[in-house]
Amino acid sequence: MVGRLRYGWGASPLHTYVALTVGLFAVVGPLSAQETGAVRGSVVADGTGAALSSVDVFVPAAGRRALTDRSGRFVLVGLRPGSWELVAERVGYGTGRQSVTVTPGGTADVTFRLADRALSIPEVVVTASREAQNLSEVAASVGVIGSAALRDVHPAHPSEIMGQVPGVWVNVTGGEGHMTAIRQPLSTSPVYLYLEDGVPTRSTGFFNHNALYEVNVPQADRIEVMKGPASALYGSDAIGGVINVGTRAPSQDTEAELSLEGGAYGYKRLLASLSGTPAGNGLRADFNATRTDGWREGTQYDRYSGTLRWDRRAGEGSFLKTVLTYSSIDQNTAGSSAVSRSDFESDPTVNYTPISYRDVQAFRASAAYERQAATWKLSLTPYARYNSMDILPNWSLTYDPSIYRTENSSVGILAKVDRPMLGQKGRVIAGVDVDYSPGSYREHSITPAKDGKVFTSYADGATLYDYDVTFHQVSPYVHAEVTPTDGIHLSGGLRFDVLGYDYQTHLAPLQTGSHRRPGDGTPGFAALSPKVGITFQATDGMNLFASFRRGFRAPSEGQLFRQGSATNTVDLEPVKANSLEAGLRGHVGSRVSYDVALYRMSKLDDVLDYRHDDGHTESVNAGETLHRGVEVGVGLGLAPGVEVDVSYSVAKHTYQDWRLDDGTNYSGKEMEFAPHQIGNVRLELSPTWLGGAHATLEWVRVGPYWMDAANENEYEGHDLLNARVTYSVTERLDLFARLDNLGDTRYAERASYNAFRGQELAPGMPRTLYAGVRIR
């Protein structure tokens, strides 16, 4: 059920849904007061004694688990007194098991020594249920990029790491800006949800497709990508998928790290970290300063990002994690600065729009409190956010030149309780998300001046839009899992979203011309999002899953209130999506792992941007689109220290029903910016004879795709080769280098067509060398 609400946000509906939320918590019951105990310990490699991070340590009978930090340490809290079996698992190592006795109020100490072993074991993920669980229990496709991969790649841009997840394509739009394609064409549409430690980086109402540049990706601990609709757990936005970036936990011992890196075109980056746990306070500070002149004319950018994290036990069975993050991005060329086909082939460094820019400020603060009792877990995460962006967009200079500023603040809370049910055979998670985000939008026209093809300056013009808008959301949900018999795991969930806007314009409404303005209003939406899934452990080495998930996406404030030339945007309907998915994952012997997913997703009332002949776009609800594909991930251990990892997807995205008022009919056509094939293949070399070196050769494939909805102009696709090497000189000193596009291939980050300007391509970087040093 997805619909519009025709009332304002008075006390009555708000009280109704708060009461519903309270009722959900009441169903689950009161917290137990029984005093519990804890287990702490460390995990090291057998033989060398080296600390092992990202080891999954868990108590199967109690459903408690933790991941070791970079020092190999872990803590498990909330265990009832008695004897328990602990299990420790990590990819590439044998499983460790130990028995431990927990006393009331006491803390037991253990040490695991894991032997080297090539057998893959299930990943632990948190995005699929908002709680840690084995991937084998998840009835969905979830890709994980671990801390080791992030540190090996040293990504200068999210596009350099996200392709390791099958079916994920992130391109470069300028600086660290990007567009994303997950089970949908590459676009700026608000169909993805971006999280940091489970907290949305932005409000639903103020979506930004460049969300990953507001996160300190190169210093993150891990990235999880849950593909397909996730509205039953996360609500609006999560149609194409959820990208959750995790911050690094503080280390047990005091440690510092400094990374200095340089490269072509004036690229410089400093990454610094300081961490430790003085007096039981886990503290970590990360800092990222990046600058480049850009390889094309007028494409320089600067960024500064910082992350502060404080972890502390707040009493027996209680834990508090506080995270502060800030990013400042100042870049020229506000998006994919495309050029004509002839300039793309002969002069790709030219930039027609060097006057364009983007200045972004993003701040987030959250405090995640967890209380673990004998059979209960309570989580409360209040948060606050601030986002602002000043932008002169380059893509509209030819038909609608303007400058605008958008900003918003947010306060909210993520609250949930998790408890077992049916003994230890299942669990239920009930929660509510609340978001209150006031913001504003100001836009004025400009009159640009040109020298030939290049825009050189501009003069300010009239104000086009000036409005305040507040986004509201109250969304209770429930998620349940049960294992009725060995090998079968069932899951289901339901979420009820009630959200809307209070919109007030400071300019007179206008219903003529190309900058129409709606009058004041309070549009609202309601949606009921269900999901069901099943996983089946067919053999010790094979796990199968299937699911049905329904998703929705409410229009963003820009789609609703920046009307443009459209007849009516305030009455835009939410996008609805229905997804069927099935897959299998597992391993063959000790050297082969695999992950295969097939999906079919249909979207109704898709909000599509219809591109007119002069290049300007109009947001319309446009019938139905269909998205089908298969995603494959394979890991091959060819020999000790020699591995091949394959991520590949084949998909087809079509307009099932898209008929416009002017008689244009694209029904049956393939969607533009939707390659049939996306691939990433990596050869990883770390044999002993390399003496502490790790080398990677990577092939990146983006297949051909249509540049227009009429399917008359096609981009030929491209293949790139990248190389990376890291050499550990000592335990505390690493040298690293990477060579991107080593074949110096001419390719496009995005290729489009319109009748007014013809084919336009945004050139990708030529062969580029980076090198650096990391000191611990």
Image (cartoon, grey):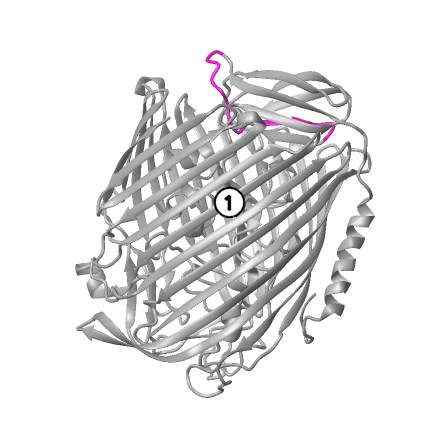
Above or below, 345 against 632 in this view is below
**Residue at 49 percent of width and 38 percent of height:** 222
Is residue 163 something that shows in the picture? no
Q: In the image, residue 458 lies at what x, y percent? A: 26, 74
Q: Secondary structure of the magenta portion, mostly?
A: loop
Residue 335 image-quadrant placement: bottom left
Say which residue label 1 marks.
324
Mark 1 crowdedness (10 Å alpha carbons): few <14, some 14-19, many ≥20: some
Is residue 636 something that shows in the picture? yes
Q: In the image, residue 166 lies at what x, y percent? A: 47, 45
Q: In the image, residue 220 lies at what x, y percent? A: 46, 39
**Residue at 64 percent of width and 17 percent of height:** 109
Q: In the image, residue 210 lies at what x, y percent? A: 43, 56
**What secondary structure is marked by label 1?**
strand
What's drawn in magenta, residue-wise? 47-62
The number of callouts visible is 1
Q: Nearer the viewer, residue 73 or 155?
A: 73
Q: Residue furthest top?
A: 47
Residue 618 image-quadrant placement: bottom left
Image quadrant where one finds the N terminus: bottom right
Q: Is residue 774 magenta?
A: no
Image quadrant where one finds the C terminus: top left
Above or below, 252 against 616 in this view is above
Q: Is residue 580 left or right of residue 654?
A: right
Q: Amino acid at mark 1?
A: Leu
Q: Nearer the viewer, residue 659 or 397?
A: 397
